[in-house]
Image (cartoon, coloured by chain):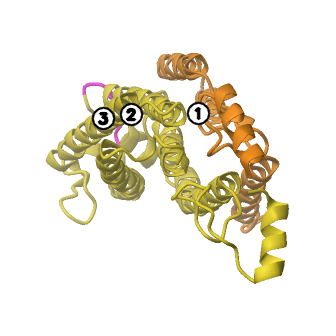
Chain colours: A yellow, B orange
Amino acid sequence: MDSHTVAAQTAETGHIEHTHDHPAFLRHHFESVPQQREAATFGMWLFLLTEIMFFGGLFCAYLIFRNWYYPAFVAGSHTLHIWAGTLNTTLLIISSFTMAMAVHAAETRVRKALMGWMIATIILGCGFLCVKAYEWHDEWVEHHVPGLNFSPVSFLHPTKDYPDDVLSLDMAEKTQVYYSLYFAMTGMHALHMIIGVSLLTILLIQAYGGKYVEGHVAPIENFGLYWHFVDIVWIFLFPLLYLISRHQ
Amino acid sequence: MDQHQGQHQEHHLHMPHGPSEPTHHEEHIVSPKIYLLIGTALLILTATTTAVSYIDLGAFNAVVALAIACTKMTLVVLFFMHVKYGSGLTKLTVAAGFLTFCVLIMMTMTDYVSRAWGRW
């Protein structure tokens, strides 16, 4: 049924007759599946823009405070494990690839491939969270968690790897600003990952039931957009938190 | 209606994914080869950024790291997020959002740089 037929029919009878030549997932208020899919993509991008503004505020705060308390941010950054950050970046990038392949499987309508790529994405996402949990535990043990068990002692004496990292007591206290932003940013990012893995599990169960391989790609595609967005946030968190202060 | 159905089926034969959910600007299924290529490029860039962080470049460590991050973001947005193959509406939305973000960061920074001007 093309748009002219619909318009003519609507003019004659006041409503659109259901001739059942459209798929069940096409909603009433859309004229065609392409229109519905484009509207969904547009809506998803608008949501992602609000997310960019949300994380953008945190990045902006990081930039400003890093300039204010530069020695504290450098010393704080030195306590992170660079191997953990690199491993997590690798896991997330591979998971973005598997998610892109899941979208491809939905578009080409191969149910087993769709489920396989989704499971791979879930496993990689959980792997990321495990490494993150290990790092957070490490920071807890080192007394680097502001407000809960923070102690500036480790910044008052030279360390094995960074003998120059000796701060005044005043500046050592300011490492709490670094750790506050670190936990806020990685914490919000991890929350997005947990939400992502949960949503993906639901989509996986639905795909097991035969959904999303009958032409209804939009939910998988939009979830993919969300997942790639979370990946992009980490692509910026990684250099800012782990890398740029190594030689300062 | 019969003729219409006929067209529908013929249409179906030419498109592997069927006619049910293409986009207005012509559906484009990105090939797995491109995904693999972009994924590999992203992994190489990750290795590069970690390797460069071990070299002392002074202030340029941050510049190089952020330049690589921006490159990675561009690759993800264009290919994994399909913006390169997206409709004009999608491209405009992404560009407008990015521009707004840059304006907000710039304005905040000009404020922080200039607020105490002449008082240090």
**Residue A90: percent from the left, percent from the top?**
41, 26
Asked whether the viewer can see residue A241, the reply is yes
Q: Confirm whether circles 3 and 1 share one chain.
A: no
Q: Residue at x 61, y 56 (%)?
A: A22
Neighbour tally class for label 3: few under 14, some 14-19, many 20 plus, Cα within 10 Å: some
Check if mark 3's residue and mark 1's residue have beta carbons within 8 Å: no
- The chain under label 3 reads A
Q: Kindly state the secondary structure of the residue where label 1 is placed.
A: loop
The stretch in magenta equals A160-166
Q: Kindly state the secondary structure of the residue where label 2 is placed.
A: helix
Instruction: Give residue B17's mark.
Output: 1
Decide: is B13 above or below B54: below
Q: Kindly state the secondary structure of the residue where label 3 is placed.
A: helix
Q: Residue at x 73, y 57 (%)?
A: A1
Task: Specify the amino acid type for callout 1.
Answer: His
Farthest left residue in view: A141
- The chain under label 1 reads B
Q: Is residue A22 magenta?
A: no
Task: Specify the amino acid type for callout 3.
Answer: Ile
